């Protein structure tokens, strides 16, 4: 038999590769983005309670209504934007599915989608599997990974169907500003270009910054799909539960895709989250929690030979090793996992041309002891 690959250039994701290597080498795993601590006991007992109560069959295709309702209230309360729980909110199996279903709903063969690189690893394959063409725009550390909107404007063509945004950003930690949103709104005015906004780190944002979604901009709301996740906020990445918020007509098309991808997502977890989200502290406290972790990690690195700009958001800190050696970042990440005992992610993997900026990404969603031990090892370099 011969199976012609639809994704001939795709291998195993860097997250799997590095986590596996960390395990084999007994290294501290600051590579793949997941916490090494448990979620709230309350949340676990709520899931248990709903399982005992028999909530173990298919959830409605759009998600448990109570969860959609509480998300609508939270989104209006925090960001001042209204989504109707009936027709504009869909619960799906993680932000990965939200992004995939959005792109499936949007892309016709040959459509172009603008992507800022470094880009989260699922974006390009999701565009290409749907018959689209990714149009990468390179963000550089020399420019603090900020977006040149004049360049973005020059990339728009009659084939541009969508533009993908990530804020807070993985891997750079960079957050969008209101001036970014104004610039985006100005260049998309009168166009038929949609915005796919990945906001999985919305609550993990530091130094008093406020999370800004393109949906908050009056000229962008109508064209925006907000893709979110409960995984990062509640330390439940393994539950793979996320959501999509979008105006009614957009949601209708989104749901047509979602119903053929997973149809619906795990029921007891949705009931549990619906209860848990009613207490605002359960999601607001994560901001401070992660700011302390970021600060612990970077304070412990003071005096080392690395260079960094503190992450504005997300649970990743980039460290530049350009003053230390000239190795390529991929080989170095592997070597340091094996020899130093600290696993990280080389950020070249997030660029389609594998641009090597001599930067590694470290995940600080780890207990304090792991962060201290990792920093101690990195100090020795
Ligand atoms: N987008 C970004 C930027 C991410 O970092 C991640 C996961 N770490 C996802 C999407 C996927 O989220 P989920 O696990 O909810 O599918
Ligand atoms: N989003 C996580 C990260 O950036 C990994 C998720 C995955 O393993 N696919 O590390």
Image (cartoon, helix red, strand yellow):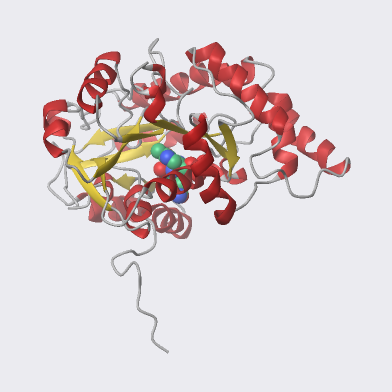
Q: Farthest residue toward the right?
A: 53
Tell me: residue 23, above or below residue 312: below
Total numbered circles? 0
Q: Quadrant of residue 191?
A: top left
Q: Farthest residue toward the bottom?
A: 1
Q: Is residue 151 something that shows in the picture?
A: yes
User: Residue 189: where, in percent of width, then height?
Assistant: 24, 24
Measuring 38% from the left and 13% from the top, which residue is drawn there?
209
Residue in the foreground of this view, choosing between 370 and 108? 108
Measuring 63% from the left and 15% from the top, which residue is drawn there?
280
Measuring 66% from the left and 45% from the top, which residue is drawn there?
61
354 left or right of 367? left
User: Residue 288: where, in percent of width, then height?
Assistant: 50, 16
270 left or right of 160? right
Q: Is residue 29 something that shows in the picture?
A: no
Residue in the foreground of this view, choosing between 329 and 138? 138
Tell me: residue 375, above or below residue 352: above
Q: Quadrant of residue 373?
A: top left
Tell me: residue 39, above or below residue 221: below
1 left or right of 49? left
* Quarter occupied by the C terminus: top left
User: Residue 102: where, in percent of width, then height?
Assistant: 44, 43
Residue in the foreground of this view, choosing between 196 and 363? 196
Q: Quadrant of residue 181?
A: top left
Measuring 31% from the left and 57% from the top, which residue is drawn there?
109
């Amino acid at each position: 038999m011969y199976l012609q690959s639809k994704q001939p250039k795709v291998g195993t994701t860097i997250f799997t590769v590095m986590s596996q290597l960390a395990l084999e080498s007994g290294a501290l795993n600051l590579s793949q983005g997941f916490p090494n601590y448990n979620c709230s006991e309350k949340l676990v007992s709520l899931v248990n309670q709903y399982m005992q109560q028999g909530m173990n069959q298919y959830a409605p295709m759009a998600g448990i209504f109570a969860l959609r309702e509480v998300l609508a209230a939270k989104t209006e309360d925090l960001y001042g934007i209204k989504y109707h729980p009936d027709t504009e909110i869909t619960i799906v199996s993680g932000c990965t599915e939200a992004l995939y279903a959005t792109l499936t709903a949007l892309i016709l063969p040959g459509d172009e989608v603008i992507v800022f690189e470094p880009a989260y690893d699922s974006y390009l394959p999701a565009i290409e599997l749907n018959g689209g063409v990714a149009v990468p725009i390179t963000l550089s550390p020399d420019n603090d990974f900020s977006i040149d909107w004049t360049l973005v404007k020059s990339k728009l063509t009659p084939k541009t169907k969508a533009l993908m945004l990530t804020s807070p950003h993985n891997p750079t930690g960079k957050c969008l500003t209101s001036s970014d949103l104004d610039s985006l709104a100005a260049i998309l005015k009168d166009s038929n270009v949609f915005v796919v906004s990945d906001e999985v780190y919305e609550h993990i944002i530091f130094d008093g910054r406020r999370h800004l979604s393109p949906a908050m901009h009056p000229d962008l709301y109508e064209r925006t799909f907000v893709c979110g996740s409960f995984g990062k906020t509640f330390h439940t990445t393994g539950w793979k539960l996320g959501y999509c918020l979008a105006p009614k007509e957009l949601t209708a098309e989104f749901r047509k895709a979602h119903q053929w991808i997973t149809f619906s997502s795990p029921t007891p977890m949705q009931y549990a989250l619906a209860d848990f989200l009613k207490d605002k502290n359960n999601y607001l406290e994560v901001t401070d929690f992660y700011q302390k972790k970021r600060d612990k990690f970077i304070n412990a690195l003071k005096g080392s030979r690395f260079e960094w700009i503190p992450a504005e958001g997300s649970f990743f800190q980039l460290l530049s090793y350009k003053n230390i050696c000239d190795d390529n970042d991929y080989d170095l990440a592997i070597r340091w996992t094996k020899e130093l005992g600290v696993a990280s992610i080389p950020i070249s993997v997030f660029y389609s041309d594998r641009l090597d900026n001599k930067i590694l990404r470290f995940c600080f969603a780890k207990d304090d002891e792991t962060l201290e031990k990792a920093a101690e090892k990195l100090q020795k370099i």
